[in-house]
Amino acid sequence: MPTVQVSVVTPDGKVYDGAVDMVVVRTLEGELGILPNHIPLVAPLTVGAVRLNKGTTVEKVAVTGGFVEVRPDQVTILAEAAELPSDIDVDRAHEAEQRAKKRIDSAKSDEIDFKRAQLALKRATNRLDVAGK
């Protein structure tokens, strides 16, 4: 079966590099499944888990925004932040989730703080999902 080379890169360096059967990313328009020989495209990403399918296994990478660039033989994910499940500090993610929930409850009158708190909650929930917690 053909594969596609995937690189997940952040400003701090490469987080993932390998060949997979299929990549699934969450764009602003919805989920996008990418197989080998996909047509070229560039799309903005939102907070979500990148799923990397290899045979019967699925690896996840927690991604916070950025872009995906697709070429027929290469997928490059340029993320603001990205973490493998083994790199996620679950306790810290739980604390961030609780802080964000408290801020959402108290920030209802201030629209800017409310949106920031919602985004923080999405990031924490995504990290916990990828970590399997």
Image (cartoon, rainbow, N blue to C red):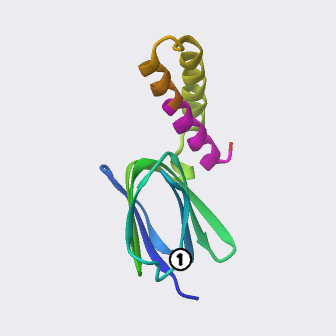
Residue 53 shown left or right of residue 69 in the figure: right
State the extent of the magenta-drawn residues as a range.
119-132
Residue 32 in the image: x percent, y percent? 54, 63
In which image quadrant can residue 96 be found? top right
> Is 73 inside the magenta-drawn segment?
no
> Is 121 inside the magenta-drawn segment?
yes
At x 64%, y 45%, the residue is 129
Residue 7 in the image: x percent, y percent? 40, 66
Residue 54 shown left or right of residue 74 in the figure: right
In which image quadrant can residue 90 be found? top right
At x 58%, y 28%, the residue is 97
The type of residue carrying mark 1 is Leu
At x 41%, y 80%, the residue is 72
For the stretch drawn in magenta, the main secondary structure is helix
**Quarter in which the N terminus is drawn:** bottom right
Residue 45 in the image: x percent, y percent? 44, 52
**Residue nearer the viewer, 28 or 97:** 28
**Residue nearer the viewer, 15 or 110:** 110
At x 56%, y 73%, the residue is 22
**Quarter in which the C terminus is drawn:** top right
Q: Which residue is mark 1?
A: 35
Residue 79 in the image: x percent, y percent? 38, 52
Q: Is residue 69 visible?
A: no
Q: Is residue 54 visible?
A: yes
Q: Secondary structure at mark 1?
A: loop
* Total tally of numbered discs in the picture: 1
Above or below, 113 against 94 in this view is above
